[in-house]
Image: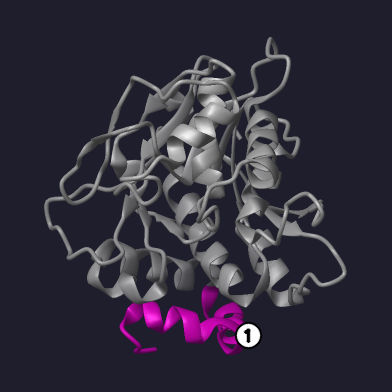
Amino acid sequence: MSADLSAFFVVEGPHLEAQGLLLASSLRGHTGDDYTLIAYRPDGPDAPAMPRVTAEAFAHLGVDLRPLAVDRSFWKKPYPHGNKLFACAAPRATSRHVFLDTDMVCVAPLDLERRITPTAVSLVPDGTPGWGKGNDRWDRVYGHFDLALPTDRVRLTRRRRVSYLPYFNAGLIGFHSDPGASKPFAQLWLATAREIDWNVSVAKKRPWLDQIALPVTLKRFGLAYDVLPDVYNFSISDRAFEPDATPKILHYHSFTYGPHWPQFKTELARLNDTLGPARMAVLAPLYDRFWHAATGGTP
């Protein structure tokens, strides 16, 4: 490993396992052994067991499977999306960290090690203003922390690409372990999300709590952010294929959106080649219902 960077994601249950294997295979294909790959498995008595063949496949891809301590009393009511915040806050040996939603696939070489610095959190704006547009929710959230609304703006990445309050897609987050910080970014984000969940009266916190808390954390603690091009978090849900687009990471949301993008199908073929026919034959009964959707429903 040469890039001092951990790329990590969460796997829990068959759907995320099928996605995680594809993500890991694609990252290995485009980064070689440069990045440390980590798949976190939430713990607890109700956590689904991972089949042995799946764990072996992750090991074959050089993925470190780690248990993730999840405090289910942390949130006011169940919030599975919160597992990404626990994963970000978990300790890792590298100084650079990149969280990826499991429903992503790498389709081109990456240079994230050069994008992540000690001075800023690296983020891609969301596609549309999915929360807080046309009402006073943002005013109330920022006001709870005695903060004025931010004056800076980001350019959203879909449809009209409007200028909007800082609002980021939490599917990819890059940050640095700054030894001079009193608390790491991920701990501050986790604490801010919890405070909003328990003590701020605004509607529709789920599933957007992570994205609500993200810009508030930055402003609350005076943290800078670096806006990454959307090629690092390129959403393809409800998006026609764009032959001139040059994404690095596709955010596909559902396997059914994959067939429209040849890059996606290339990575699915890579998974088959990397794991090999014998291993794939054993994995097929577990995951073919997901992978077949990604090829348009054909084996």
Residue pointed to by mark 1: 282
- Which quadrant of the figure has residue 254? bottom left
Q: Is residue 50 above or below residue 40?
A: below
SS majority, magenta: helix
Residue at the image point whose x is 50% and y is 35% from the top: 140
In percent of width and height, residue 118 lies at 55, 16
Nearer to me, 145 or 183: 145
- Which quadrant of the figure has residue 199? top right
Q: Is residue 150 above or below residue 91?
A: above
In percent of width and height, residue 279 lies at 60, 78
Q: Farthest residue to the left: give it.
A: 244
Looking at the figure, which quarter contains the N terminus?
top right
Residue at the image point whose x is 65% and y is 60% from the top: 80
Q: How is the image coloured?
A: one colour
* Left or right: residue 299 compared with residue 277: left
* Magenta part of the chain: 276-299
Nearer to me, 94 or 152: 152
